[in-house]
Each structure stands twice: as C-alpha cells, then as structure tokens.
Amino acid sequence: MNSEFSNILKPFKIIFIILIIEFLLTFSFFTAYYAKYDKNLFEVKINDNLIKCYYSEKYSNGFIINTGTSDYNDVENDINEIEFNNKVYLDLDEYELYYKNGNRASAITDWHKNENLNYKKVKGTTIKLQIKRKNKVLYDGDYIKDISEYVNENGRYFIHIYSTRKENLITKVETHISFNFIFGGGNHDEKN
C-alpha cells in the first residue's frame, strides 16, 4: 500500500519541482529587469570647487528587489584642497539626466556631466549631513549650505551626505556620498 501511494504522488512531486524551477527562473528575470532604475547625477562643491567624492547607491523596490552601485565621481583633483576662508559653503546639486531626444538616460553609471545629455535639477530630496574632524562629530543633521560654523580652522574634515529619493510609495533610492578635504593647507591634523 505504501508503494502504491508513493507511485501516485510521484507525478505530483515532479510537477511541484518543475513549478518551483519555473517560479525561480521567472523571479530572477523580473528581478533583473526591475532592478534597473533611473540614476541621478550629484555635483558637490565647496566654495565653488568641484569635490572628488565616493558614492554608493542602494535601490529598493518594496521587499523583493535591492540593487546598487558605487564608484568615484569623475573630478580631476585627487586631493580636495580648499583655501582658508571665513565663509565655507557646501553646494550639493542633484540632476536627472535626459538624452537630447527627451528620453530619460537610465543607463548612465558615472557621475560627470556630458555634452550629449540634458540635466534637470531635482528638488525635494531628503538630505542629511554629517561633518567630522579628529574623530569628533561636529555636525549631524539636515543638509545646510553654510558650514562655516563647523569648518573654521585649518585641517582635514570628513563629510558624509545621505540622500533619500522616493520614486513612489514603495520604491526609493538611497545615496551615500563621502569625501574629505584639507582646509587651509597642510595635510595632517596635529595630534591632541
């Protein structure tokens, strides 16, 4: 009786395994297709100087699809040096990228402006900022442009920018931008 029952269930087991394989193949196709997202370009400047920075992005589509990229932006200077000034302004601009024909340029993966593209400034993104020096957090809060209060003496400063862009109710792109710069010359902080 046991072997008869086992023989009856055998075709169902095979069908069940085939259905699982089909589901996994379909799921992997949709994950790869829907993991593509529209990437934006960020420009970071301190006192009108373009800053070399590292960025990483995480795209989340509900609970299923998570993907991302990371790289350095395409700025010529390898060391960010800023001349001493009483006023220090951090400019952060985010742009959507479009081809000349008006279609969204989704396949762009690096952060540099290109003559073949049009750029539309983005507003309304949630941005958090953290400023560090000598392993101390000087500022941690919402993005502010005027950072003179926190960057006010010679030395190396570390900046972290966290941007969250919601595309719809469940889809979001989180961008982390980090860089350091030397303010007022020199290349080391004195040890205290």
Image (cartoon, helix red, strand yellow):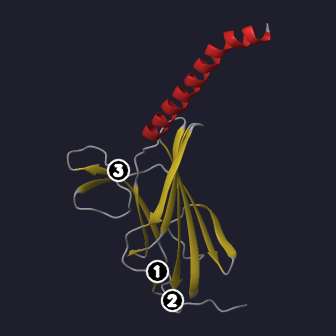
Instruction: Please state the horizontal and vertical placement of residue 100, each as a whole percent of the image.
Output: 21, 50
Instruction: Please state the horizontal and vertical placement of residue 31, each as a whole percent of the image.
Output: 49, 38
Q: Residues within 10 Å of mark 3 (few under 14, many from 20)?
A: few
Residue beneath label 1, please? 80
State how far apart marks 1 and 3 are (Cα).
28 Å
On residue 107, the disc is 3
> Which of pointers 2 and 3 lies earlier in the amino acid sequence?
3
State how far apart marks 2 and 3 are (Cα).
39 Å
Instruction: Please state the horizontal and vertical placement of residue 27, each as a whole percent of the image.
Output: 52, 32
- To which quarter of the image does residue 93 belong? bottom left
Q: Are marks 2 and 3 in contact (CB under 8 Å)?
A: no
- Nearest the eye: 178 or 153: 178
Quadrant of the image for the C terminus? Answer: bottom right
Residue beneath label 2, please? 184
Task: Name the secondary structure under disc 1.
Answer: loop
- Nearest the eye: 67 or 130: 67
> Which of pointers 1 and 3 lies earlier in the amino acid sequence?
1
Q: Nearer the viewer, mark 2 or mark 3?
A: 3
Q: How many marks?
A: 3
Quadrant of the image for the N terminus? Answer: top right
